[in-house]
Image (cartoon, rainbow, N blue to C red):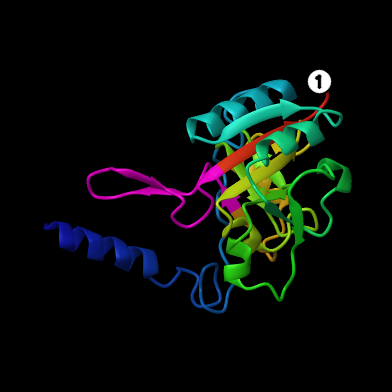
Amino acid sequence: MSSKDRILARIRRATAPPAGGPDGPGGPDGPEPGIPRDYLRVHGARTPAENVDLLAAHLTEYRAKVHRTDEDGLPLLLARLLSRHESVLVPPALPPHWLSAAGPTRIPDRAASTPRELDRAGGVVTGCALAIAETGTIVLDGGPDQGRRRITLIPDHHVCVVRVPGQVVDSVPQALELLDPARPLTWISGPSATSDIELDRVEGVHGPRTLDVVLLGAQ
């Protein structure tokens, strides 16, 4: 039997009518069969602090720059990270005390802004919906402290603040239970990057070239 014959045979078996007829499980008029979800939800047992350390390690591996601070140190840290910019985009509900009055000009997230106008901003500062320790992924859902998806994709520099350990979950299955699939979800694992056929890495292709992640918690 050829490989083609094996593939077609498997397709026929998978699409064959159910033994119970059209009204049986899996039939066109019957209930959908249950999907087994017996995979591991978490790989290993970790404390909240260990989860934060794992998240930081994966983000660093993906070439994001990771910083740790508390509420008192956050304005000074953000001022340092944004010091090379004349202006930054800010979502509507970004806590105002995060950014120093002496820092870059704040450009609010406006629906009327054009891509060219957004591109003039040096960077963007946002919060996040949550972060996933096992994959080093930050998820945005367009919440008030994150703004529209486009303000995190057009500027060349994204500074994202993650509240730890409260916004950190172990795994993707845990994250999916907490996220609303109807919202505009953006999954970020490091700066935007790609590579050509010769594996030359190019950053900033379809998103920010530089990603700074601030882990905000008690020091």
Instruction: Report the residue at 58% width, 67% height from top.
Output: 32
Instruction: Report the residue at 73% width, 55% height from top.
Output: 146
Is 197 colored magenta in this rendering? yes
Q: What x and y, as percent, mark residue 210?
A: 54, 43
Q: Quadrant of residue 65?
A: top right
The amino acid type of the residue labelled 1 equals Gln
Instruction: Report the residue at 58% width, 74% height from top.
Output: 30
- In the rendered image, the residue lying farthest to the left is 1
Q: What x and y, as percent, mark residue 111?
A: 72, 73
Q: Give the range drawn in magenta.
A: 187-210
Residue 181 in view: yes
Instruction: Report the residue at 66% width, 43% height from top.
Output: 159
Please tell me which residue lies in front, 156 or 33.
Answer: 156
Residue 31 in view: no
Is 206 colored magenta in this rendering? yes
Which part of the image, by quadrant, shows the N terminus?
bottom left
Judge the density around disc 1: few (<14), some (14-19), many (≥20) Cα neighbours within 10 Å.
Answer: few
Is residue 28 depicted above or below 210 in this figure?
below
Please tell me which residue lies in front, 161 or 137.
Answer: 161
Q: What x and y, as percent, mark residue 148?
A: 69, 63
Q: Name the residue under label 1.
A: 219
Is residue 62 depicted above or below 108 in this figure?
above
Q: Quadrant of residue 83?
A: top right
- Side of 74 relative to 80 (left or right): right
- Secondary element at tag 1: loop
Which part of the image, by quadrant, shows the C terminus?
top right
